[in-house]
Amino acid sequence: MDYRSAFKASVARVRAEGRYRVFANLRRVRGQFPRARWRTDEGDVRDVVVWCSNDYLGMGQSPCVTGAMKQAIDDVGAGAGGTRNISGTTNYHVELEHSLADLHGKEAALLFTSGYISNQATLATLGKILPGLIMFSDALNHASMIEGVRQSGCEKHVWRHNDIAHLEELLRAAPVDAPKLIALESVYSMDGDIGPLEAVCDLADKYNALTYLDEVHAVGLYGLRGGGIAERDGLMDRFDIIEGTLGKAYGLMGGYIAADSVIVDAVRSWAPGFIFTTSLAPAIAAGARASVEFLKSAHHLREAHQERAATLKARLKEAGLPVMDSVTHIVPVHVGDPVLCKRMTDALLDDHGIYVQPINYPTVPRGTERMRFTPTPMHDDAMIDALVEALRAVYVQHAGMKVA
Ligand code: PMP
């Protein structure tokens, strides 16, 4: 086989569809978030405002987080030195798990090296632990949940996005005695809508199903202590497993589940994605614990975040830009074509110093390509003004938008 040609051909297919990914080479500068330095392909360095970071509250730059990390490095060094089972469990990991269990009002929590692995490893493992389990998965669930469901080997049913009647139809059709699990997200990361959490819990009670909730885009951001939408809506005790990340609002990396200790103990004992990998660096766990604890009482930051998102949405609407409906901090603006999307984001970066990545298939369905803006409390009015002006200019120039 001509391996080189095969690799090239696979990338050529992606290029032909206009969705070849180019990574912007960014340097974050301590204290300046959301400003950053961008190194162009020619090696020039330019100042940009980042509008697509998932460091939603700027915690990745917070002295309380970086201070805890520095202290941990000084105290114990860099790496964990092993898997959780073989010398890689430290007091930092244990304390962070306690902090996360407390956040969600659960008996226990379990850390993974990313949110992706938490979903994939937990769902795949539940399928092995519970013989005959049938999984019911929302159509827009994240790739990591889709992978987990697939690897579980379970019979699966995909319910139309947020369509509770369709979910009930599928549950009703399944054998009464079969074990069941319903998996959904709280905040959907690309549309900024919210799953029907309470209705799902009601159905789970009615059909005796387990409930699995991905709160990756909500932890730290919603609820009085940052416990997510389930906390905000008083539903934490109705979800059997809550999954979250330390990589977004908490500003670091890593993922976790929180649940009853019997569930955590079973996943801990059987999930290859937990067992056979080096545990998070102690400094990451120390920084994450500082971040989680800080945000439990920093409700003002959550309020400031919501205010910025509401202001941005209102300003984009006023300017006649095609901002999509979103009830959360995620602000998607419709483009509908991958090539155009890339052209517009290139123009924003090159001509206006605004960095946002195009969002293309398979992250979103074809024809719904978009730019996805994520305001933070650190985006000031001048940055919002500059963004709205720049977007009007690129929509006029590249998408033929008429300006009133
Ligand atoms: N779930 C959802 C809904 C996500 O959007 C993501 C990441 N974008 C993940 C899980 C994975 O989290 P992590 O980045 O921590 O791997």
Image (tube, helix red, strand yellow):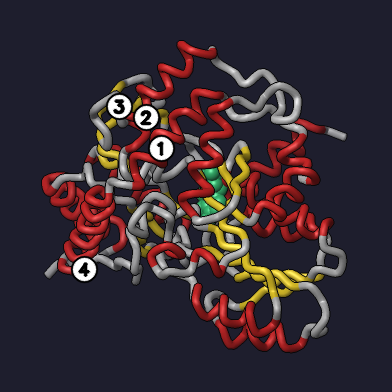
User: Is residue 365 something one can see in this rendering?
Assistant: no
Q: Are marks 2 and 3 in contact (CB under 8 Å)?
A: yes
Q: CA distance from mark 1 to mark 3?
A: 12 Å
Q: Earlier in the sequence, mark 1 or mark 2?
A: 2
Q: Residue visible at 31% across and 44% down?
A: 57
Which numbered dot is residue 251?
Answer: 1
41 horizontally vs 114: left or right: left
Give the vertical position of 308 relative to 76 (above or below).
below
Whole-percent x and y of residue 96?
52, 37
Q: CA distance from mark 4 to mark 2?
A: 36 Å
Question: How many residues crowd around disc 2 within 10 Å: few (fewer than 14), some, or many (20 or more)?
Answer: many
Which numbered dot is residue 65?
Answer: 2
Question: How many residues crowd around disc 1 within 10 Å: few (fewer than 14), some, or many (20 or more)?
Answer: many
Which amino acid type is marked by label 2? Val
Q: Which type of secondary structure does the marked residue at label 1 adopt?
A: loop
Q: Which type of secondary structure does the marked residue at label 4 adopt?
A: helix
Q: Are marks 1 and 3 in contact (CB under 8 Å)?
A: no
Whole-percent x and y of residue 268?
73, 44
Mark 2 residue CB less than 8 A from any atom of ligand 1: no
Give the vertical position of 137 relative to 281 (above or below).
below
Q: CA distance from mark 4 to mark 1?
A: 30 Å
Give the vertical position of 390 relative to 91 (above or below).
below
Residue at the spot of label 3: 63
Would you identify the image quadrant in which residue 400 lies?
A: bottom left
Q: Earlier in the sequence, mark 4 or mark 3?
A: 3
Q: CA distance from mark 4 to mark 3?
A: 36 Å
Which tag is nearer the camera, tag 1 or tag 3? 3
User: Is residue 317 something one can see in this rendering?
Assistant: yes
Which amino acid type is marked by label 1? Gly
Where does the C terminus fall, quadrant-wise?
Answer: bottom left
Where does the N terminus fall, quadrant-wise?
Answer: top right
334 horizontally vs 339: left or right: left
